[in-house]
Image (cartoon, rainbow, N blue to C red):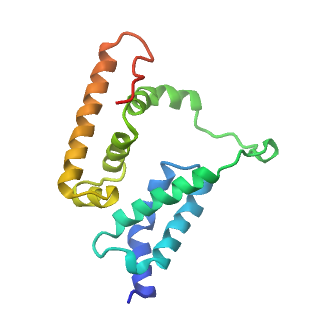
Amino acid sequence: MRDDDWFEALVQAHASAVHRYLARRAAPSDVADLTADVLVTAWRRREDVPEGAELPWLYRTAGYILANHRRKMRPVPVERVPDEVDDADPAALAVRDEQLREVLAALSPRDRRILLLHAWEGLGGAELADVLGISRGGADAALSRARARLREVWSDREAASGPGAVTQKR
């Protein structure tokens, strides 16, 4: 039976990784609550968390919680928009990331997810397979195919002369 000590060790080992995962995908104001939701789910379903594959299970759970959160999102009324100005210049960030966003947007959602789990979360092999719910060989093959499609889209983009050349989902 998994007890408080097990959960405390889980939180100590993986809460930061789950927080970073969600910070890359959700509004900053939602990240702490979403992280807490993932950890609450881990506590409630502690007997379902696979031994030795806790982090992939948490990432998969975070993906479900984030998807549910996005379905429930409502527009923020203007009177609740913060008055503080963010120091980061959105125009500079947009220019810097435009090429990467265009190339990633041209990939299928599955390829994009696989590449981001590998690049951002550092998952490979068995952990990637656990998050995707497929075999290790299937995960390795999916990552290889996603990388090949990324190279192809990037090459197509470089060969094209104008902006917006990358528009087709593969």
> As displayed, is residue 107 above or below residue 160?
below
Residue in the picture at 58% in, 32% down = 90
**Residue 13, placed above or below residue 100:** below
Quadrant location, the N terminus = bottom left
Q: Is residue 144 above or below residue 6?
A: above
> Closer to the camera, 141 or 122?
141
The C terminus - image quarter: top left
In the image, what residue occupies the spot 45% across and 31% down? 97
Residue 19 visible in the current orientation: no
Q: Count of labels shown?
A: 0
Residue sitting farthest toward the right: 79
| Left or right: residue 134 compared with residue 40 | left
Place of residue 85 in the rendered image (x, y in percent of width and height, measured from the top left)? 69, 39
Q: Residue at x 36, y 9 (%)?
A: 161
Whether residue 9 sits left or right of residue 83 in the image: it is: left
Residue 58 is at least partly visible in this image: yes
Given residues 94 and 151, the one toward you in this image is 151
Q: Nearer the viewer, residue 169 or 29?
A: 169
Residue 91 locus on image (x, y percent): 57, 27
Q: Write down the quadrant of residue 164 in the picture.
A: top left
Among all residues in the image, which is located at the extreme top?
161
Residue 65, how many percent across, how many down?
Answer: 52, 60
Q: Is residue 156 left or right of residue 39?
A: left
**Front in this rendered view, residue 42 or 31:** 42
Q: Residue at x 44, y 15 (%)?
A: 163
- Direction from residue 34 to residue 120 in the image, left or right: left
Query: Residue 110's x, y, as percent?
Result: 36, 43
